[in-house]
Image: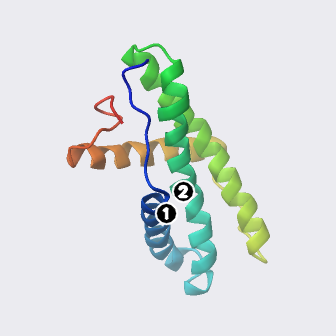
Amino acid sequence: MTDQQRFREPLRVTLTRTISIALLAATIAAPRLGGIRRWPVLVALMLWPAFGGHWLEVLFLNWLRPRLPAKQSIQTVARLLLWFGGGIVLALGARLTAKLLLAHPPASWLPWFIAGTGFVVVELIAHAGLRARGRPSFYSGGG
C-alpha cells in the first residue's frame, strides 16, 4: 500500500499524551489498588498500555500496513490481531514490572485473553475519540 503516509509525531507530544494517560489511569485505579502509596508504581504500570500501545500503533501504521494488501477487511483483521497480541505482551510487561517494584505484587492477574481483549476495547474507544474529533482513526481506515 503506497498511498498511506508514514505516521510521525514529535516525541515530546507522544510523551505528554501517554504520561498524562498513565497519570490519570493511576489516579483512578489507586483507591482500589492499594491507595496513594502505590500511585507511583501504578503510573509505571499504566505506562505499559499507554506508551507501549502508542508504539504498537506506530508498528502497524509504518511497518505492517504498508506490507498488507490494500483491502480494508484484511487491514482491519490484522490491526485487531496486533492489538490483541500486543495487549497480552504489554500486560506481561506490566506484570513483570509489578514484580520488580512491589514487595507484595498481586497474587492474581488478568488471564491473557482478557488482557488482549481489554486492550482491543481500549484502542477502539481511543479511536472513537479520534474519529469524534475528525482525526484519522481505525474507523475511517486512515489512522
| Residue at the image position 37 percent from the left and 18 percent from the top | 72
Q: Which residue is mark 1?
A: 15
Under tag 1, what secondary structure?
helix
Which numbered marker is on residue 133? none
Between the residue at mark 2 and the residue at mark 1, the CA separation in whole angstroms equals 8 Å
Q: Front-most of 121 and 49?
A: 49
With respect to residue 63, does 134 lie above or below?
below
Q: Would you place residue 75 above or below residue 21 in this image? A: above
At which x and y percent is residue 106?
71, 67
Could you tell me the amino acid type at mark 2? Phe
Could you say which is closer to the camera, residue 118 or residue 128? 128
Which residue bears the numbered disc 2?
51
Mark 1 neighbour class, 10 Å CA radius: few under 14, some 14 to 19, many 20 or more: some
Q: Which residue type carries mark 1?
A: Leu
Closer to the eye: label 2 or 1: 1
Q: Earlier in the sequence, mark 2 or mark 1?
A: 1
Image quarter in which the C terminus is found: top left
Asked which quadrant contains residue 7, the reply is: top left
Q: Nearer the viewer, residue 79 or 84?
A: 79
Q: How many marks?
A: 2
Vertical position of residue 52 compared to residue 43: above or below = above
Residue 34: % across, % down: 60, 80
Q: x, y percentage for residue 84?
A: 56, 37
Q: Residue furthest bottom?
A: 37
Q: Which quadrant holds residue 123?
A: top left
Report the residue at 50% width, 33% height from top.
62
**Which residue does the image show at 46% across and 58% down from the upper left?**
14
Q: Is residue 72 left or right of residue 111?
A: left
Q: Are marks 2 and 1 in contact (CB under 8 Å)?
A: yes
